[in-house]
Amino acid sequence: MRHSELLRSTAFRLALAFSGLFLLTFLVAGFFAYRIIVTDLNERLDRTLLETFDMISRSYTDGDVEDLIGTVRTYAASSQSGQQVFYLTDTSGQFAAGNVTTASVDPGLSTAPAAAFGLPGEDQFRTQRGAVADNELVIAQSFAETDELAGLVLTSFSWAGAIAVAIAVVAGLLIAAAVRRRMNAIAGTMGRVGQGELSARIPLRGSGDDIDVLSGQINAALDRLAALVEGMRQVSVDIAHDLKTPLNRLSIIIEDALDKAERGQDNADELLTAQVEAGRINDTFEALLRIAQLESGARRERFIDVSLTATLAVLLEAYGDVAQENGQTLTITGPQDNPRNIRGDRDLLTQLFANLIENAIRHAEGGASITVDIQSHHGVVTVRVADNGPGIPAVERDKVFRRLYRLEKSRTTEGTGLGLSMVKAIADLHGATIELADAQPGLSVTLSFPAITGQIGA
């Protein structure tokens, strides 16, 4: 990966922006922390001065000025660094004790330069001036130690901020490199797909992060794309295979009609047969086009609340007599007092269940029982269409949803092989799952639809 690409990557820019935000936050927090520390140090200095002044004042008892002078001299002697000042004058205002000979400061707590005590340098002193009986006592403490601690804190904050920013930038580079590798993997996979390698998939790390989730969604879309392309290829093969026979038959019928016409014979029967055959071919293409339309989701804008219970009741009335004529029974089971509403296209749902019932009537033998059961639980409406006919072998159940696919035993019966393909397309359009199972004996087709929230039993 080129260095310029890494620096332009979104991950690195986000890491850089985060570093800037962190530094700004650190500076603001550091400023307030520094001010709090400096204020606390100054308050501690004031308390120390007042406590020292109080301790020295207590040494003056019973008017014994010598004890007071001795105490000041002791404190002055212990301060050899020049950071503390002690100055005592007697009742006449003359110097009595201390480590300086002058102290031009204001009464009470105040701040004064070193020159106020006749000291060299630019240091500032915190001072306390007050009376002890008729004597005047001044004590002072340099800000040098406090300033040194404040400077140490400021330096520590500066180094900490610099180190944190450096770590953030390095971490940003590492994260950007890792993200860039994963994005390159996605780009590489999409490039391979664009070149026709539809089996290419993005490798997943299993971490469950956002890139993994996105990669999983892209892989799912690629699976769908591969399935659609394979479906188109299979449809092309199936159309070429399954329509070749009716087209050849149509061609033969037309040739027979032409021959009779040349001989002056009546060819009306051949032309009628050709018309029927052409109609079947046209119906097949119309069904294929309708399935393609359903798979594109073009009918979702027509969705309304549909009662599956009412829809199935209409189909029972329509197909009940047909089943009876074949010596079969068609019944609907399940609670009938609940409408079992879903969002969908009423006409398409009617066609879906009509196809399933027609398949059961067509392929089940006389005396067979066909049952349609509707239930609702946990936000799902399930409809199960079962018969005790010959059923579908387990190895064929995934194939019967393919366009124009027909079982060998079904090729002698009328049909295009698109009935279950239409069922699958309508089910997918409605977000329903479809499952084929052995009814022992016979076939069981179970569809599960998402119910409308709030209805009874949902």
Image (cartoon, rainbow, N blue to C red):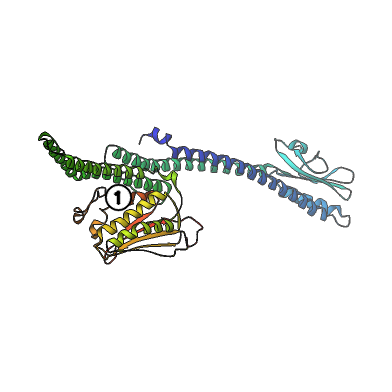
The number of numbered badges drawn on the structure is 1
Comparing 35 with 196, the one in front is 196
Q: Quadrant of residue 437?
A: bottom left
- Quarter of the picture containing the N terminus is top left
Comparing 248 with 177, the one in front is 248
Residue 310 image offset from top left, x and y in percent: 43, 57
Comparing 43 with 337, the one in front is 337
Residue at image location 72% in from the left, 39% down from the top: 124
Whether residue 227 sits left or right of residue 20 in the image: it is left
Callout 1 crowding tier (Cα within 10 Å): few <14, some 14–19, many ≥20: many
Mark 1, residue position? 421
Whether residue 400 is situated above or below residue 364 in the rendered picture: above
Q: Is residue 372 visible?
A: yes
Please tell me whether mark 1 sits on a helix, a strand or a loop.
helix
Whether residue 355 sits left or right of residue 68 in the image: it is left
Whether residue 344 is situated above or below residue 455 in the rendered picture: above
Residue at image location 37% in from the left, 56% down from the top: 315
Whether residue 359 is situated above or below residue 270 in the rendered picture: below
Whether residue 449 sits left or right of residue 120 in the image: it is left
Q: Quadrant of residue 330?
A: bottom left
Residue 288 image offset from top left, x and y in percent: 29, 43
Residue 379 image offset from top left, x and y in percent: 46, 59
